[in-house]
Amino acid sequence: MLSPKDNVATVLADLKAGESLEVEAGGKPTSFKMAQDIPFGHKFSLASIAADAPIIKYGEVIGTATTPIAPGDYVHVHNIVSARARGDLKGGKAA
C-alpha cells in the first residue's frame, strides 16, 4: 500500500487462500484474510468495493470494479477493468 487513499495493496510474496496478512491501513494495523490465492506482485482489496466503484492504487484511480469486491479478495482482470491505455474508449464511452 503506497497511499492512504489506496483501496488495494500489492503482495510481495505468493499468498494462499486463508492466509492472513497485516497491513497498516487508515493509520492502524489491520489484518486481512486472503479469500483466494494471490500471486506475487498482484493486488488484494483493503476494503469493500462496490461494482462500478474506482480501484485506487498509488493514490490514483487505476480501474473500475466490475463486480463487488470484499476485503481480502484477489483484485485482477476477472473483477476490474483498467482505466489506463483503453484504446476501445472514445470520450469515456465504448467506441
Image (cartoon, rainbow, N blue to C red):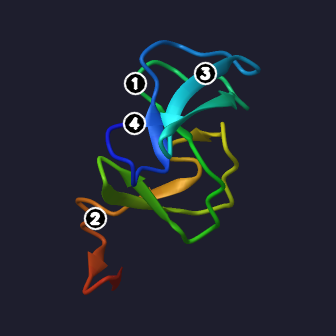
Which SS class for mark 1? loop
Residue found at x 47% / y 12%: 13
Residue found at x 45% / y 36%: 9
Q: Position of residue 45 (x, y in %)?
A: 57, 43
**Mark 2 or mark 1: whose residue is earlier in sequence:** 1
Residue found at the very far top of the displayed protein: 13
Q: CA distance from mark 2 to mark 1?
A: 22 Å
- Residue toward you, 80 or 88: 80
- Residue toward you, 43 or 7: 7
Three-letter amino acid code at disc 1? Gly
Crowding at dot 4, Cα within 10 Å, few <14 / some 14-19 / many 20+, comes out as some
Three-letter amino acid code at disc 2? Arg
Placement of 14 over or under 29, stated as above or below: above
Depth check, mark 3 against mark 1: the one in front is 3
Residue contact between numbered discs 4 and 3, judged by CB atoms under 8 Å: no
Q: CA distance from mark 4 to mark 2?
A: 25 Å
Placement of 60 over or under 40, stated as above or below: below
Q: Which residue is mark 4?
A: 1
